[in-house]
Amino acid sequence: MSAVEHRYEVCSRELRYRGRIFEVVTEEVTMPGGGTAARDLVRHVGAVAVVALDDAGQVVLIRQYRQPVGRRLWELPAGLTDVSGEDPSVTATRELAEEVDLTAGRLDVLVDVHSSPGFTDELVRVFLARDLGEVPVEQRHDRHDEEADLQIVRIDLDEAVGMVLAGEISNGPCVAGLLAAARARDAGWSGLRRADAPLPR
């Protein structure tokens, strides 16, 4: 690595598309050795995901249809961080209740994942939820669209890790969360961060 790192500066920015969840922009960026290059990228609101681990060592997974890949994927309970000023831990708690009807007595940070930094700034914070409880039936969220079709299962954590290694689980935050949870468990939960730990910058 060189003694002085190049500082990449944005010379211009052109908005191509703006939606509720993301926007697409083209940025002209200074390159090492002189000159600039155009980079198309997706600015994303971000998301959270939750590895919900019960007292029997099982994780709660959902199977959800995803239109971009045209099939159902194994995933963690997850959602967008699209409420301005809301702490990600609050978002995670809400998504856990809405998607799988669970509460958590304890919430820690497992891992932060840049989902695909070659084209998007999306950051997914994956939490570990323990001391699980059930949301009362009368307070449960009414799920719509793809969420109305969710399949919710509990699988032993080691079995879920095996599914990752076998290629059966390919959702990025789910892969990262399950592997991180297994490693954290084997280390006696000693490396976990507090639920309010700052996001990486």
Image (cartoon, rainbow, N blue to C red):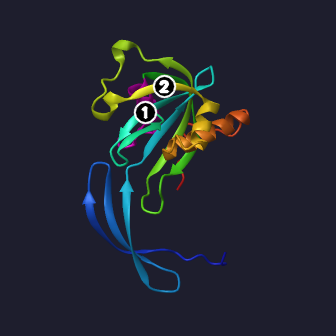
Task: Point out residue 169 in the picture as x, y percentages from the top left corner.
Answer: 52, 41
State yes or no: residue 88 in magenta: yes
Task: Point out residue 39 in the picture as x, y percentages from the top left corner.
Answer: 39, 71
* Few, some or many residues within 10 Å of mark 1 (<14, 14–19, 20+): some
State yes or no: residue 70 in magenta: no
* Residue drawn where x is 55% and y is 47% of the image: 112
* Residue drawn where x is 48% and y is 52% of the image: 115
Quote the CA–CA distance across marks 2 and 1. 8 Å
Q: Which residue is mark 2?
A: 153
Asked if residue 186 is positioned above or below residue 6 in the image, the reply reads above
- Amino acid residing under circle 1: Arg
Please identify the quarter of the rendering in which residue 121 is found: bottom left
The mark nearer the N terminus, 2 or 1, is: 1
Q: Which residue is mark 1?
A: 63
- Position of 167 with respect to 122 (left or right) is right
Please identify the quarter of the rendering in which residue 13 is found: bottom left
State the quadrant of the N terminus: bottom right
CB atoms of marks 2 and 1 within 8 Å: yes
Which secondary structure lies at badge 2? strand
**Does the image show residue 17?**
yes
Asked if residue 150 is positioned above or below residue 167 in the image, the reply reads above
* Residue drawn where x is 38% and y is 27% of the image: 98
Which secondary structure lies at badge 1? strand
* Residue drawn where x is 45% and y is 31% of the image: 62
Instruction: State the residue in front, 41 or 150.
Output: 150
Task: Point out residue 155 in the picture as x, y percentages from the top left corner.
Answer: 56, 27
- Position of 145 with respect to 44 (left or right) is left
- Amino acid residing under circle 2: Val
- Which of the numbered marks, if any, corresponds to residue 14? none
**Does the image show residue 193?**
no
* Few, some or many residues within 10 Å of mark 2 (<14, 14–19, 20+): few
What segment carries the magenta color?
78-100
